[in-house]
Image (cartoon, rainbow, N blue to C red):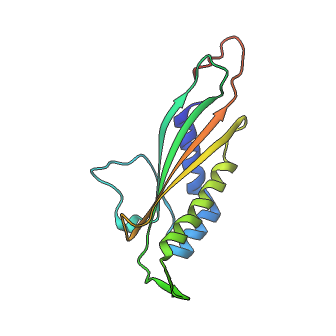
Amino acid sequence: MDINTLTRGFSTGVKTASPIDSWCITTYGQGLKVYEGVDPRNPPEDTDCPYIIFAPVARSGGENPNPKQCVLGFELTVLDESQPESVEGVTSYAGLTDSESLRKLVIDQIISDLPTGMSLESIETDYDPIEQYPFCNIGVTLVVTEEKTLGIGISPYE
């Protein structure tokens, strides 16, 4: 299991997914911008929203009986320039629901792009809708596992 190949497969799948592209164009007037890593000295601009940044986080393997693991992360950002909506005395901001809707579409695409023999063991999502307002950020950590294959010339470490 190569973490860079896995990252590229997921980022390419998300970029070319019609449901994601259609949703972004309908909701934000442009397609999703996809990055693999980012230069913190030159981050995406406001006009790049919505965007997603994929990055490898960690990997593990070894002679223990546990499956090999790749941990990948992505950060999803939308820009909420809408006016808050008040219904029955509750004020809500579209960026909160939009970012979660987009996250679900991305996760569905990643699940469909999982290579044969690999499984998505866990998904952890962190929400940051207030600190960076009017940007709504969602950070997601994915743990992808692959059972070890025994045999001559097969490394349990990779």
| Residue 30 visible here | yes
Q: Give percent across and percent down for residue 98.
A: 54, 70
Can residue 29 be seen? no
Residue occupying image coordinates x 33% and y 48%: 39
Relative depth, front residue between 9 and 52: 52
Q: Position of residue 49 (x, y in %)?
A: 43, 66
Which image quadrant: the N terminus? top right
Residue 72 x %, y %: 52, 42
Image coords of residue 142 (percent x, y): 57, 44
Residue at x 36% of width, y 67% of height: 46
Quadrant of the rendered structure where residue 25 is?
A: bottom right
Placement of 124 over or under 144, stated as above or below: below
Please tell me whether residue 151 is drawn above or below residue 44 in the rendered image.
Answer: above
Quadrant, the C terminus: top right
Q: Is residue 127 above or below residue 156?
A: below
Q: Nearer the viewer, residue 89 or 74?
A: 89
For the point 51% across and 87% down, the residue is 89
Q: Residue furthest top?
A: 152
Vertical side of 134 occupied by 91: above or below: below
- The extreme bottom residue here reads 88
| Residue at the image position 72 percent from the left and 14 percent from the top | 151
Q: Given the current orientation, which residue lies at the most extreme left position?
A: 41
